Amino acid sequence: MIDPSQIRWAILIAMLAMLMMAVFVITFVVLYQKRQLAQEKNLREIEKEYQLKLLETALDSEESERKRIAQDLHDDIGTMLSLTKLSLNQLTKIINKDEPQTEYTANKVQSLLEETILHVRRITRELVPTTLKQFGLPTAIDEFVQKLDSNHSTSIQFNCNFETIPRQSQKVELTLYRIMQELVNNALKHSSGDQIVVELQLEMGKIELQVTDNGKGFDAKAMKESKKAGLGLHSIDSRLSVVHGNVAYLTPATNGCRIKVQVPLEPEKQNKTEPLHPFRKTA
């Protein structure tokens, strides 16, 4: 006859074995899921890094193409226009100035040619902002704003304490400069306002760029979601993702629109001295 105590012990051992097996299975499943999640996280990070590299390469290619076009404008078209101007000057000296219409036409052509040369030079400078590389972001923005302010009925102001903004890497400075260009040009085209204020300052370890206008404003979220949205807003997001920056679209108390862009400050660049721009306006 089987001893009941032996049966109880056998059942207890069997239950303990099943419990241990269940704990083992649960532990294995949990560890497997954690490993899967870690692998998925690594894959997402690798994919994100890959996308950023692709985006950075695309932006570098865009800047390289700008430089190529600017070089072609300067070397080819600029040279041809300058030679044409010299030839026209020589021709003006030998034409019959007794004819008022002839002299008027020659002067008109010369004026148009000089204006075309100025436009080519302006486009070249906008394509490749040499001031940005030589003198830094604040001076480049100041130069851009001064030229726009003198050529538009809209008032454009730039507020910045030049001495507080340290030099940054070419990637960061160029990113902020291109975003500033995009925001100011958008305000001029679409805001219907008569005043634009550009501000550059340091804020909690970040370089902060603000562009404010007193126009009709817009809903940035709705613009991005709609099919009517242009490439401008998406381009700003793309550029900022490369330098780990962010953008906020705000509505000031006076209506209009205020766009705030922030990019982390690069500590290793803080002690780099900025050269003096020969044409900077003193405060």
Image (cartoon, rainbow, N blue to C red):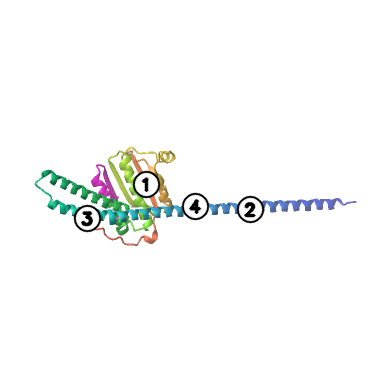
Residues at circles 1 and 3 in contact by the CB criterion of under 8 Å: no
Residue under label 1? 260
Q: Of circles 4 and 1, which is in front?
A: 4
Q: Residues within 10 Å of mark 3 (few under 14, many from 20)?
A: few
Element type at mark 3: helix
Q: Quadrant of residue 193?
A: top left
Residue under label 3? 83
Label 4 vs 2, first from the N-terminus: 2
Q: Is residue 8 visible?
A: yes
**How much space separates mark 4 and mark 1, taking CA atoms?**
25 Å
Residue under label 4? 48
Q: Position of residue 5 (x, y in %)?
A: 84, 52
Q: Residue at the location (19% across, 47% down)?
A: 109
Element type at mark 1: strand
**How much space separates mark 1 and mark 2, taking CA atoms?**
44 Å
In-front residue for pair 139/30? 139
Residue under label 2? 32
Q: Of circles 3 and 2, which is in front?
A: 3
Element type at mark 4: helix
Residues shaded magenta: 144-162
In-front residue for pair 169/269? 169
Q: Of circles 4 and 3, which is in front?
A: 3
Q: Position of residue 194 (x, y in %)?
A: 27, 40
Residues at circles 3 and 2 in contact by the CB criterion of under 8 Å: no
Q: Of circles 1 and 3, which is in front?
A: 3
Label 1 vs 2, first from the N-terminus: 2
Would you say residue 179 sits in the magenta stretch?
Answer: no
Residue occupying the far left of the picture: 98
